[in-house]
Amino acid sequence: MEEQLKLTCLHEAHVALGAKMSPFAGFDMPIQYSGIIDEHNAVRNEAGVFDVSHMGEIFIKGADAERFVNHIFTNDVRGMEDGRILYGMMCYPDGGVVDDLLVYKEFEDNAYLLVVNASNIDKDYAWMQEQSKGYEVSIDNQSEAFGQLAIQGPKAEDAVVDLLEIEEVRELEFYTFLDAEDDRGGRVIVSRTGYTGEDGFEVYASPDVICDMWQWLMDSGVKPCGLGCRDTLRFEAGLPLYSDELSDKISPVMAGLSMFCKLDKPEFIGRDALAAQKADGVARKLVGIELEDNAIPRATYPVELEDGTVVGVVTTGYHSISLDKSICFALVDSSCSALDTPLWIRIRKRTFAGKVVKKRFYQTKYKK
Amino acid sequence: MSKVLEGLLYSESHEWVKVDGNIAIIGVSDFAQSEMGDITYVDMPDIDDEVAKGEDFGALESVKASSELYSPVSGTVVARNDELEDKPELINEDAYTAWIIKVEMSDKAELENLLSPAKYSEIAG
């Protein structure tokens, strides 16, 4: 039986705007409204708002919360100041990835908010439960109680300050957050985070409040943006998508994300495997490839050497909207992963020449 | 409602053909371009390549997807619209002036299987 698609609190609003809807991570989500290119450029040049209410929010509290989060998380939460945020992964013992996520250090002791991918909420929650034996912690999946908006772009700061009437938002540093209250006393979380390579914010609140905020943003002319440009934006900024660039088969070391794995921590799940991968090297690595031609490399297309030997596979690819070049992420044999290595991509009947480049194709514009 | 031009023949895979003697000028319909959205790349065969009726000879690419182009006739490619290399959006602007290739037909009888504008209008809502 086909599983019923879930709807975010903004579903009706998307349909009313004429969005092209499509299933994503079990939700019926807007792919585009005015068009991917138009929405992409709005985020790069002005501001756009995304409904990301499908994302998961899991709260961890208790006497052992710090030790527990550090047990399941690759980054190091020891000594994190309240209001700070860290990116990292949860790994399996073999170094494969359960999920990539953000950890928010709450404004109280022994309390964290973990923001996880929509497609992985149930799996992540079950994984956390399993790993928590012997730890004094409560694990509370509040994903249904929170909606979420991502407001992104050079004009996002003004839009969010106008929306919330909270001047302190301007002072937020990248990867920090503040707490606020809505009219009804409900919790509002505002973080300077995003998935576009631009400055921007993510706002969490109850579904009703999120609907009001969305309407306010529409009325003030902030462009509604769908998952289509969310993918082109994050891709240009060199950011991985779980299942494409990170998975149970693609470790953070393979994906070039070792900087988010603190191997000097006393322990965490997957540490030994990741340390071994780091020491011995991995068979395949994630690289960026830029093509000479405008043909578009897409996921699953083979990566080859000039003689036709297959050395890898494309994971995400586009004709980049901001850079006007055909570029992709690909998992390739480590022997072919050095910058400037010539590689060919098979697109339908022909192969197209390119070379390895840095994965951060677009110069990101985060607020420091 | 997409535009269907008189004086052309159409394939069920949304290509149009303009017949000029033994030459078939081939493009995609207005319906095809509107379904694709912003076209960012046109993959075209080389001159002198052989194409066969019903087989793919190239593709249109939008930001999100690629869509194969199927030849409505068999023959040899005698020209391609190189202007589309730099300006693929010409197809979005007017699908009926932005031709893609010209083919010297090897079997003009194949044209009989193509759709009239009226017939094509029924499938290109």
Image: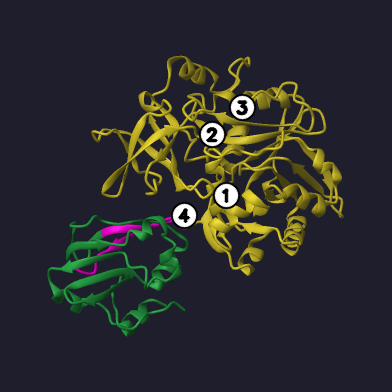
Chain colours: A yellow, B green
| Amino acid at dot 3 | Ile
Within 10 Å of disc 3 (Cα), the crowding (few <14, some 14-19, many 20+) is many
Q: CA distance from mark 4 to mark 1?
A: 12 Å
Q: Indicate which label's residue lies in the foreground, 4 or 2.
A: 4
State the extent of the magenta-drawn residues as a range. B57-73
Q: Which residue is mark 4?
A: B63
Asked if residue A54 shows in the view, the reply is no
Q: CA distance from mark 1 to mark 2?
A: 22 Å
Q: Indicate which label's residue lies in the foreground, 4 or 3.
A: 4
Q: Which residue is mark 3?
A: A72
> Which chain is home to disc 1?
A
Q: CA distance from mark 4 to mark 3?
A: 37 Å
| Amino acid at dot 1 | Arg
Q: CA distance from mark 4 to mark 2?
A: 29 Å
Asked if residue A131 shows in the view, the reply is yes
Q: Residue at x 29, y 79 (%)?
A: B8
What element does badge 3 sit on? helix
Q: Are marks 1 and 3 on the same chain?
A: yes
Q: Within the image, what quadrant is residue B101 found in? A: bottom left
Q: Residue at x 85, y 51 (%)?
A: A165
Q: Which residue is mark 2?
A: A98
Q: Indicate which label's residue lies in the foreground, 4 or 1.
A: 4
What element does badge 4 sit on? loop
